[in-house]
Amino acid sequence: MEQDKCGLPDIEQFAGLQGNSCRYGLFNRHGGVSKGAFDSLNIGLAVGDAPELVAENRRLVKARMGVSHLLSGKQVHGEEVYSLAEPLTEDLEVDGYDAFITNQPDVGLMVQHADCQALLLYDPENKVIGAVHSGWRGSVMNIIGTTVQAMQKEFGCNPGGMRAVVSPSLGPCCAEFVHYQKELPAHFQQHMDDRLRFDFWQISRDQLLEQGLADSAIILPGRCTSCSEDYFSYRRACRESNGITGRNCSVIAL
């Protein structure tokens, strides 16, 4: 996705679909109104930024996406999936959820992240979308698989026809896990290099393939948030200062 360093991104659609009714945006840190460590499109309400500035940043995201309301969560690195089957009348941020699914139009499912992955899902046949917050803990719990299964159960989705895109996030260049033997399952080691760095992009790809998605339907990122100063990064903030930073967002909507 192309994005000017001083502006908001172009909004994308999944390629090759007739009558495409889904759009998504992978937002970086530029184009907002926040200052200092949160410069400038911070959308996180719980990181120390002024609430009125975050509210304006979220308004800018909604305007760019062309939606009236956002559904998001006070994310806890868990595996709970929130299912929305009725229209929203205002923005909603639910406590304790890290994934969201809906068949409702005009609602942006928003994931907040600063190195973790936002994984966006679309079923073009049933017109259903999903958004997943998956850090390394989410990968261990396989929240991706849980979300795909929830889309099947709640809305009758067929994984074989679904599309997926993974946001810019911590890349294989920077995802070092010194204590990987305690923190990560053994089968993740097939994606580990000799410097104890893990390719979580490929781990997410494997988890999507296990659920029945086609390899050609999965878009993986080419940008690491820890490397690129165009994105908020918790790892970079800890490496360079006190760990205080904003949150990027990724949004999908019907």
Image (cartoon, rainbow, N blue to C red):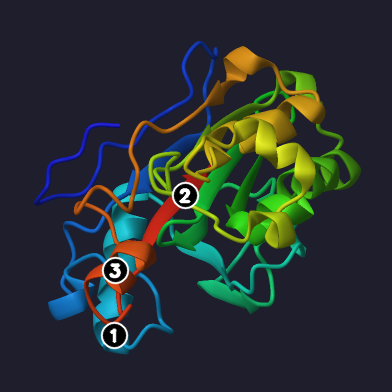
Please rate how many residues cluster around mark 3, counting C-alpha atoms within 10 Å: few if below 14, some from 14 to 19, many from 20.
few
Residues at marks 1 and 3, CA–CA distance in whole angstroms: 20 Å
Foreground mark, 1 or 3, reads 3
Residue under the point 63% across and 37% down: 204
Q: Secondary structure at mark 2?
A: loop
Among the 4 quarters of the image, the one containing residue 208: top right
- Which amino acid, by three-letter code, is at mark 3? Arg
Residue under the point 56% across and 41% down: 200
Please rate how many residues cluster around mark 1, counting C-alpha atoms within 10 Å: few if below 14, some from 14 to 19, many from 20.
many
Residue 78: where, in percent of width, then height? 72, 67
Residue under the point 60% across and 19% down: 217
Q: Is residue 112 left or right of residue 232?
A: right
Please state which of residues 184 and 101 is positioned toward the viewer in this rendering.
184
Residue 173: where, in percent of width, then height? 38, 40
Please state which of residues 126 and 50 is positioned toward the viewer in this rendering.
50
Among the 4 quarters of the image, the one containing residue 9: top left
Please rate how many residues cluster around mark 2, counting C-alpha atoms within 10 Å: few if below 14, some from 14 to 19, many from 20.
many
Q: Which residue is label 1 attached to? A: 49
Q: Which residue is label 3 attached to? A: 239
Q: Secondary structure at mark 1?
A: loop
Q: Tag 3 or tag 1, which sits nearer the N-term?
A: 1
- Which amino acid, by three-letter code, is at mark 1? Asp
Q: Residue furthest front?
A: 194
Look at the picture and state if 125 lies above or below 67: above
- Which amino acid, by three-letter code, is at mark 2? Ala
Q: Tag 3 or tag 2, which sits nearer the N-term?
A: 2
Look at the picture and state if 78 lies above or below 125: below
Q: Which residue is label 2 attached to? A: 175
Look at the picture and state if 190 lies above or below 242: above
Tell whether label 3 touches label 2 (CB within 8 Å).
no
